[in-house]
Amino acid sequence: MKSTSFIQVDLRADGILVLTINREAQYNALSIATMQQLEQLLTQAKSQVGLRGILLTGAGEKAFVAGADINEFKMLAPSESRAFAERGQRILQLLEQMPVPVVAAINGFALGGGCELALACHIRIASENAQLGLPEVKLGIIPGYGGTQRLTQLVGKGRALELMLTGNPIKAEEALRIGLVNRVVPAEQLLPTCFDLLGSMLERAPLALTKVLQAAAAAQVGGSAGYEAEAAAFEDCCQSEDFREGVQAFVEKRKPSFKGQ
């Protein structure tokens, strides 16, 4: 995979794909072109041999992604607005449905579309200087890339509505308190922490990781769908070579050697 004009790509030897939104002068704002490039890269990544995890971050020290590109908003015709939102939703759903763990390294402002991007990642780690929020109501619009749905599911209706109805951002520690992020660390420890976290996941059975992600995603459907997905995923895992290896390694008191089969 090659870097694009707005996204830097680094596929590490350990199978972690690092995607860096690279528009530092614009606080890594999500332009239409940036979103298109993200969609292309994620589509390629789904079939990337040896891919084990994804780390998503922003260039520089000030912003993860400070939002969508407001200059493009000004040019958006009302007749184009629904398609604009649906396109963004489709791309972030692609990110959310990746079969490997996706970690957001939030290294500064994560506002509007940037916060929605972080919400679509499976896990969020924030630096102490990070700020997160959905300020769209201050522009007379609402979050359109799935933010109203994911934030509500993540932190609960009351807290989500407070954030979205005021549009006010919150600091990293408050985001941690309400469950919006998983951890808060000093800025210099952000990437090492994310790589360590992904590294611990890479030691586990790849097939089991994928099945956990699928079963957890099914919980959003409601009703019995999540339980049915869990049971089916459990059955698949029990039929895998990794399961047999994991049990044998436990009995023999050694580290398992998983193959993702």
Image (cartoon, grey):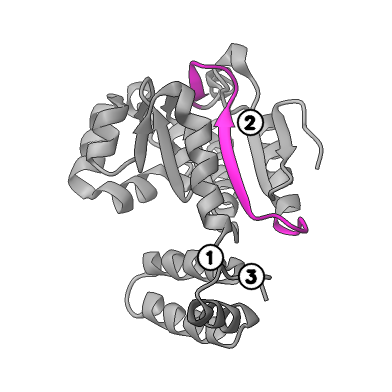
Helix or strand or loop: what does disc 3 sit on? loop
Image coords of residue 183 (percent x, y): 35, 39
Amino acid, disc 3: Phe
Q: Are marks 2 and 3 in contact (CB under 8 Å)?
A: no
Closer to the camera, 130 or 208? 208
In the image: residue 213, left or right of residue 25: left
Closer to the camera, 188 or 247? 247
Query: What residue is disc 3 on?
Result: 258
| Label 2 crowd bin: few (<14), some (14–19), many (20+), radius 10 Å | many
Q: Are marks 1 and 3 in contact (CB under 8 Å)?
A: no
Image coords of residue 51 (percent x, y): 70, 54
Q: Does 56 appear above or below 189? A: below
Q: Does residue 66 belong to the magenta stretch?
A: yes
In the image, which is nearer the foreground, mark 1 or mark 3?
Answer: 3
Helix or strand or loop: what does disc 1 sit on? helix
Query: What residue is disc 1 on?
Result: 209
In the image, which is nearer the foreground, mark 2 or mark 1?
Answer: 1
Instruction: Name the quarter where the N terminus is drawn.
Output: top right
Amino acid, disc 1: Leu
User: Quadrant of the rendered structure where residue 246 is?
Assistant: bottom right
| Residue at (76, 51) in percent of width and height | 44
| Residue at (54, 64) in percent of width and height | 204
In the image: residue 67, left or right of residue 98: left
**Residue 82 in sight here:** no
Helix or strand or loop: what does disc 2 sit on? strand
Image coords of residue 32 (percent x, y): 65, 31
User: Quadrant of the rendered structure where residue 40 is?
Assistant: top right
Q: Does 115 appear above or below 93? A: above
Pointer 2 or 1: first along the chain: 2
Which portion, as a residue range, is magenta? 46-67
Query: What residue is disc 2 on?
Result: 20
